[in-house]
Amino acid sequence: MQILYAILIGALFGGGMYMLLRRSLLKIIIGLLLLGHAANLLIFTAGGLTRAASPLIGPDGTELTGIYADPLPQALILTAIVIGFGVIAFALVLVHRVFTDLETDDTDDLKMTDT
């Protein structure tokens, strides 16, 4: 299963980098989305793929014993999803503003507005 996740993560990173190198601003945002998903899957896979018990200590115990799920990657992924959503929403607002003002989303045409 980890081999499948490794191939998927590589494909997402490759597709994200390809989309980041495109000229359209919307394709750049899609590339950011793909990179964010790839990073989340990488953290998820690095945390270990186990079907284990939840990481809760019972009222009679003082420490975790046996195989349990690691909650840290799950918390990191949840935080990354929220931050990624904010960044993508901000980028979409910026692209919308650029498109309404300049009527183009081509990055080569945006270079002409520097002077």
Image (spheres, rainbow, N blue to C red):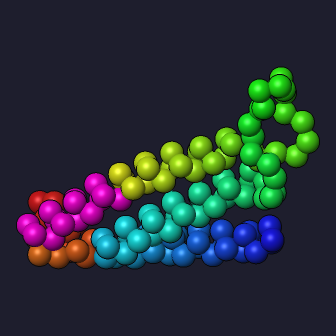
Taking 67 as reference, is 104 left or right? left
From what the image shows, is residue 73 above or below residue 97?
above
Residue 90 on the magenta span? yes
From what the image shows, is residue 97 above or below residue 57?
below
Q: Residue 65, how many percent across, how many down?
A: 90, 36
From what the image shows, is residue 11 above or below residue 37?
below
Q: Quadrant of residue 102?
A: bottom left
Quadrant into which the N terminus falls: bottom right
Residue 108 seen anywhere in this rendered image of the structure: no
Which residues, given as a range, are shown in magenta? 88-101
At x 22%, y 60%, the residue is 93
Residue 74 on the magenta span? no
At x 88%, y 46%, the residue is 67
Q: Residue furthest left?
A: 101
- Pick whichever, 60 or 64, lies toward us: 60
Q: Residue furthest front?
A: 60
Taking 10 as reference, is 19 left or right? left
Q: Main secondary structure of the magenta part?
A: helix
Quadrant into which the C terminus falls: bottom left
At x 63%, y 75%, the residue is 11
- Pick whichever, 17 or 72, lies toward us: 72
Q: How many marks?
A: 0
Q: Residue 84, how many percent across, how many down?
A: 43, 54
At x 69%, y 43%, the residue is 71
Q: Residue 31, how many percent across, how many down?
A: 45, 69
Residue 31 seen anywhere in this rendered image of the structure: yes
- Pick whichever, 90 or 103, lies toward us: 90
Taking 28 as reference, is 107 left or right? left
Q: Residue 98, how many percent across, how many down?
A: 16, 65
